[in-house]
Image: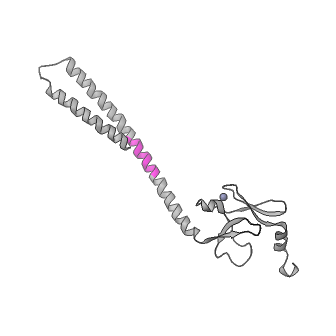
Amino acid sequence: MSAVIGEVSGRVIELLKIAEQLKALSPVLSGKKRQLLAERLEAELNDIQISIRKAELSALEFEKAQIQLNDEIKRLKQWHEEKAGYEEYITPAGGATYRRKHHGSERGSGHHLCATCFENDKKSVLQPIPGEGVVQFKCHQCGTPVMMETLRGFVEFQVPEWER
Ligand SMILES: [Zn+2]
């Protein structure tokens, strides 16, 4: 936008020069020279009008971008507050997720967040997907699969402790 403003002020200087020339013309002198200066004046004014329109468009785009940035800052601030309530968790199968610090004592309680998205400041809850011999979750935002437990682990999870 500053480039457009620079362009406009350059053209205004040009206009002032033309106006000076017009003033300097003898009042008795008429015709071709006057006509030429009037045409130059008109052309400069047209260019200024185009430049001003460009500046208006840039200003609108700038405002839009600023609103988007403010929304993004707000979202990130909220997320960073929420993020502090989570901690890294390594699943029995060695996969990394994030889950709430106070997730309760029960195993498997609470949701798990995708570690990749978490590092990229996005909250994405992992969802279970069918898997052979494993309990597998997947992030539907970035597509990262996370192995939660192997089948043995899964069986252990289902079987009461005294029967293991
Ligand atoms: Zn993800």
Compared to residue 43, the image places residue 75 above or below, namely below
Tally the numbered discs. Answer: 0
Relative image position of residue 118 (x, y in whole percent): 62, 62
Give the overall secondary structure of the magenta segment.
Answer: helix
The region drawn magenta spans: 55-65
**In this picture, is 137 found above or below 155?**
above
Residue 51 vs residue 101: left or right? left
**Residue 153 in magenta stretch:** no
Quarter of the picture containing the C terminus is bottom right
Left-right relation of 18 to 71:
left
Residue sitting at 49 percent across and 58 percent down?
71
Visual colour scheme: one colour
Residue pictured at 46% horizontal, 54% vertical? 67
Quadrant of the snapshot with the N terminus: top left
Residue occupying image coordinates x 33% and y 41%? 5
Q: Quadrant of residue 44?
A: top left
Q: Position of residue 143 (x, y in %)?
A: 70, 55
User: Which quadrant contains ligand 1?
Assistant: bottom right
Instruction: Judge from the rendering whether residue 20 lies leftward or rightward of residue 68; answer left or right.
Output: left
